[in-house]
Image (spheres, rainbow, N blue to C red):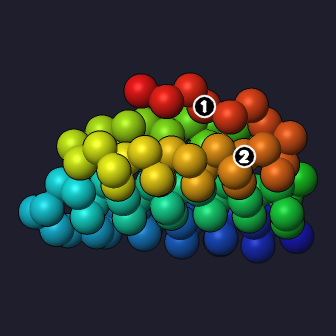
């Protein structure tokens, strides 16, 4: 079973590293959502809260780097809702 988890993690890593867009907003938002969903998968399927916490933090870092305030705020809010649903602390707003 662990092999399947590792295969899934490899796919998420590929999704993060293979996105080649010059638009920083699109890259940060897409990577943030990918990290967020990866963290949820770690909780739902691998029962790995430590790894999920690290991935939620990566999502927060991506979203925090978005220059457009309204989009950044909404992305961080949505991340907080997901994190709270898994029992994690909601990240403070930048």
Going from N to C along the chain, the mark reached first, 1 or 2, is: 2
Q: Measuring from the top left, give residue 88's x and y in whole percent.
A: 78, 36
The label shown at residue 14 is none
Are there few (<14), some (14-19), or many (20+) residues within 10 Å of tag 1?
Answer: some
Whether residue 48 is visible, yes or no, is no
Image quarter hosting the N terminus: bottom right
Dot 1: element: loop
**Camera-side residue: 10 or 33?**
33
- The residue shown at (73%, 59%) is 40
- State which quadrant residue 89 falls in: top right
- Image mark count: 2
Tell me: 45 left or right of 26. Answer: right
Residue 41 versus residue 58 in the image, above or below: below
Mark 1 and 2 residues: CB-CB less than 8 Å, in contact? yes
Tell me: 10 left or right of 3. Answer: left
Instruction: Quote the CA–CA distance across marks 1 and 2.
Output: 9 Å
Whether residue 38 is visible, yes or no, is yes
Image quarter hosting the C terminus: top left
Q: Measuring from the top left, give residue 45's x and y in whole percent.
A: 85, 66
- The residue shown at (33%, 50%) is 70
Tell me: 4 left or right of 78. Answer: right
Residue 46 versus residue 73 in the image, above or below: below
Dot 2: element: helix
Q: Measuring from the top left, give residue 18's x and y in whole percent.
A: 31, 68
Are there few (<14), some (14-19), or many (20+) residues within 10 Å of tag 2?
Answer: many
- State which quadrant residue 38 falls in: bottom right
- The residue shown at (85%, 63%) is 44
Q: Which residue is mark 2?
A: 83
Q: Measuring from the top left, give residue 81's x and y in whole percent.
A: 70, 51
Q: Which residue is mark 1?
A: 91
């Amino acid at each position: 079973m662990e092999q399947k988890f590792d295969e899934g993690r490899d796919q998420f890593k590929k999704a993060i590293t293979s996105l080649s867009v010059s638009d920083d907003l699109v890259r940060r938002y897409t990577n943030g959502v990918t990290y967020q969903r990866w963290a949820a998968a770690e909780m739902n399927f691998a029962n790995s809260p430590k790894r999920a916490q690290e991935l939620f933090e990566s999502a927060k870092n991506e979203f925090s780097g978005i220059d457009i305030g309204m989009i950044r705020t909404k992305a961080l809010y949505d991340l907080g809702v997901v994190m709270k649903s898994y029992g994690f602390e909601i990240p403070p707003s930048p």
